Image (spheres, grey):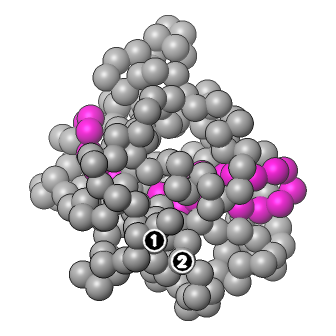
C-alpha cells in the first residue's frame, strides 16, 4: 500500500511540506495550533488537534536541550527541519517535538496537548485513562496517547508514519494565548508557550490558562 493510500481517510490530506517547518520556532509554534497531528501505527491510527505548544531554541535559550551544543540525545534538534525529535525524561516519560529552522541551528516546538480526534479508544488503552480531555493533556500524555517513544526520534514528518495534515487550522473560534513556559527553571521570562485560550484539553494550572492574548 502506498504511503498516500495509508494516509487516506479522516485525517487527510497529505503532510505539510518541509517549508512549513523551515522557519523560526516561534513562527511554527503559532502556525501549528489547530492542526491535526497523526500517527499511523501498526495498532491503528491516532490523531489529535494541536491545542498547546512551546517553542525552544539553541544557544540563546537556557531552557533548551541544545543550549550547550549537540549531544547524541539532542542531535535531531539540529536539523534538518520537518523531523520528529523525541526525548526521554525523568526516567519514565517521552515528549515529542517538531524540528524547525535551518540545519545546524537547533530549534524545535514541543507539543504539549492535543484534542483527541481519531483513535480515542486506542489512546485510552495506551494511557490507561478514560476522561477524553485528559487523554493527551501534557507533553508526556501526548507521546503516550500517540504511541511514540525514543525509537521514533528522527522520523521525517513530511513522509510519515507521523505527520501533520496539510489542511486549514481548526481553532474552534478560540483566540491564541501566550505565557511563560511550564516545567522549566530558566528562561522563564520568555512567553514562548502558545495555546488555544479556553480549550478544555490545554494543560497546566488555572493560572497558566489565563494568559495574555498573543498579538
Q: Quadrant of residue 196?
A: bottom left
Which residue is farthest left? 130
Question: For this rendering, which residue is in front, 129 or 104?
Answer: 104
Q: Which residue is mark 1?
A: 178
Q: Which residue shows up at 76% across the image and 71% down it? A: 58
Q: Residue 137: image x %, image y %?
A: 30, 62
Residue 213 position (above or below residue 47): below
In magenta segment, residue 104: yes
Q: Which residue shows up at 57% across the image and 46% down it? A: 152
For the residues bearing labels 1 and 2, Cβ distance under 8 angstroms? yes
Question: Helix, strand or loop at disc 2?
Answer: loop
Q: Is residue 86 left or right of residue 49?
A: right
Q: Which residue is mark 2?
A: 191
The total of numbered circles placed on residues is: 2
Question: For this rendering, which residue is in front, 40 or 183?
Answer: 183
On the question of residue 192 being in view, the answer is yes
Residue 118 position (above or below residue 74): above
On the question of residue 160 being in view, the answer is no
Q: Please give the range of residues in magenta.
A: 91-119
- Pick whichever of labels 1 and 2 is earlier in the sequence: 1
Question: Helix, strand or loop at disc 1?
Answer: strand
Residue 191 position (above or below residue 11): below
Q: Which residue shows up at 13% across the image and 58% down it? A: 131
Amino acid at each position: 500500500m502506498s504511503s498516500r493510500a495509508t494516509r487516506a481517510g479522516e485525517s487527510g490530506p497529505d503532510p505539510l511540506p518541509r517549508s512549513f517547518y523551515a522557519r523560526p520556532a516561534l513562527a511554527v509554534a503559532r502556525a501549528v495550533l489547530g492542526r491535526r497531528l497523526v500517527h499511523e501505527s501498526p495498532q491503528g491510527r491516532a490523531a489529535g488537534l494541536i491545542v498547546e505548544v512551546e517553542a525552544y531554541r539553541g544557544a540563546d535559550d537556557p531552557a533548551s536541550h541544545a543550549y550547550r551544543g549537540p549531544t547524541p540525545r539532542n542531535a535531531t534538534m539540529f536539523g534538518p527541519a520537518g523531523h520528529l525529535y523525541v526525548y526521554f525524561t525523568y526516567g519514565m516519560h517521552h515528549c515529542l517535538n517538531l524540528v524547525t529552522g535551518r540545519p545546524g541551528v537547533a530549534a524545535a516546538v514541543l507539543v504539549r496537548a492535543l484534542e483527541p480526534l481519531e483513535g480515542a479508544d486506542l489512546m485510552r488503552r495506551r494511557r490507561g485513562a478514560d476522561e477524553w480531555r485528559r487523554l493527551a493533556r501534557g507533553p508526556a500524555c501526548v507521546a503516550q496517547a500517540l504511541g511514540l517513544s525514543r525509537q521514533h526520534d528522527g522520523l521525517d514528518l513530511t513522509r510519515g508514519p507521523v505527520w501533520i495534515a496539510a489542511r486549514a487550522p481548526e481553532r474552534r473560534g478560540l483566540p491564541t494565548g501566550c505565557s511563560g513556559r511550564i516545567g522549566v527553571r530558566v528562561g522563564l521570562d520568555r512567553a514562548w508557550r502558545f495555546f488555544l485560550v479556553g480549550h478544555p484539553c490545554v494543560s497546566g494550572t488555572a493560572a497558566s490558562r489565563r494568559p495574555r492574548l498573543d498579538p
